[in-house]
Image (tube, grey):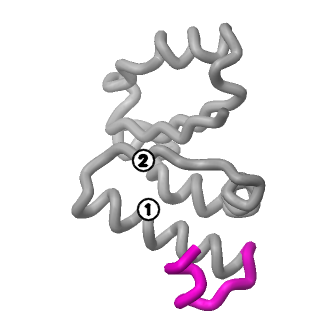
Amino acid sequence: ARLFLGVRTPDDEVFKTPVEEAIKIGALDDVSVTFASGDKDKRLVTDVLLDEGEYVWNHFESGGVAFICGGARSFGAAVEDVLLKIFQVHGSLDYSDSEQY
């Protein structure tokens, strides 16, 4: 399993210990942590998802699922937009087919 985790700043990384433990016991294979602010490399989870589009597409194509947590209004809409782009680029689907996928 892979985790894409976004937090506001490095100081807000309250999930660090549980994530490290999940890796240690094999519950997670990989983690991408992004910081929306307070870090020189500030990025959003949606940026990383887009960068990892081929991985995301292959994950869904192999029957994988995704659990998405965050604000439904802005974060949920942003993730949906990125997923539609990934499905179009890496799955060669048109917009309508991406929505159905």
- Amino acid at circle 2: Ile
Other residues around mark 2 within 10 Å, as few (<14) / some (14–19) / many (≥20) = few
Q: Is residue 70 above or below residue 26?
A: below
Q: CA distance from mark 2 to mark 1?
A: 8 Å
> Overall secondary structure of the magenta stretch?
helix
Query: In the image, residue 22 lies at what x, y percent?
Result: 58, 15
Left or right: 43, with 14 as reference point: right
SS assignment at label 1: helix
Which quadrant of the figure contains the N terminus? top right
Query: In the image, residue 8 lies at what x, y percent?
Result: 33, 38
Specify which label sits upstream in the sequence, 2 or 1: 2
The magenta stretch spans residue 96: yes
To which quarter of the image does residue 92 belong? Answer: bottom right
Query: In the image, residue 69 lies at what x, y percent?
Result: 36, 43
Pointer 2 residue: 68
Pointer 1 residue: 79
To which quarter of the image does residue 72 belong? Answer: bottom left
Q: Which residue is located at x 57 percent, y 80 percent?
A: 98
Which residues lie in the magenta part? 90-101
Q: Nearer the viewer, mark 2 or mark 1?
A: 2
2 and 1 marks in contact (CB < 8 Å) = yes
Query: In the image, residue 35 lies at what x, y percent?
Result: 43, 40
Q: Which residue is located at x 60 percent, y 63 percent?
A: 50
SS assignment at label 2: loop
